[in-house]
Image (tube, rainbow, N blue to C red):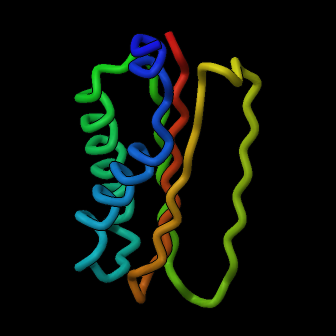
Amino acid sequence: MADELEKKFEYDTTVQIIEDQVKAILDQKVYDAKEVHVWSSEIVKRVLKQLHKQNKPFKYVVTCVIMQKNGAGLHTASTCYWDTKADGSCSYDYHSNKTMHAICTVFALHI
């Protein structure tokens, strides 16, 4: 039983990791189109590093979309065909910044 818990995808922990890393990068920034690729790459790198520290048997896919706040809406969707008992995913929607939105998603594939 304990072995099964160690291998389970931890949704709440993963969302917290994403939130911490997104806020660390974006909280004090003002939207700059020239910097978005740097910020999104850094967020992905930091999230992956924190997930790797958990030493769980997963392969991770992390995406990050950053968009300027200008009144336009943003809608994203994803679908996966996988083992619903072992794999998992979660997203974090960042909207605390007055100049930008960010959506970061983690897909965890059990190996």
Please state which of residues 23 and 45 is positioned toward the viewer in this rendering: 23
Q: Residue 24 appears in which quarter of the rendering?
A: bottom left
Q: Residue 27 appears in which quarter of the rendering?
A: bottom left
Looking at the image, residue 42 sits to the left or right of residue 14; the answer is: left
In the image, residue 11 sits, relative to residue 108, either above or below, namely below
Residue at coordinates 50% horizontally, 9% vertically from top-left? Answer: 111
Q: Residue 26 appears in which quarter of the rendering?
A: bottom left
Residue 86 at what x, y percent from top left? 60, 19
Residue 36 at what x, y percent from top left? 38, 64
Residue 48 at what x, y percent from top left? 33, 36
In the image, residue 30 sits, relative to residue 18, either above or below, namely below
Please state which of residues 102 and 11 is positioned toward the viewer in this rendering: 11
Looking at the image, residue 16 sits to the left or right of residue 9; the answer is: left
In the image, residue 97 sits, relative to residue 111, either above or below, namely below
Please state which of residues 30 and 26 is positioned toward the viewer in this rendering: 26
Residue at coordinates 25% horizontally, 64% vertically from top-left? Answer: 25
Residue at coordinates 29% horizontally, 58% vertically from top-left? Answer: 20
Residue at coordinates 47% horizontally, 52% vertically from top-left? Answer: 64
The residue at the far front in this view is: 1
In the image, residue 46 sits, relative to residue 103, either above or below, namely above
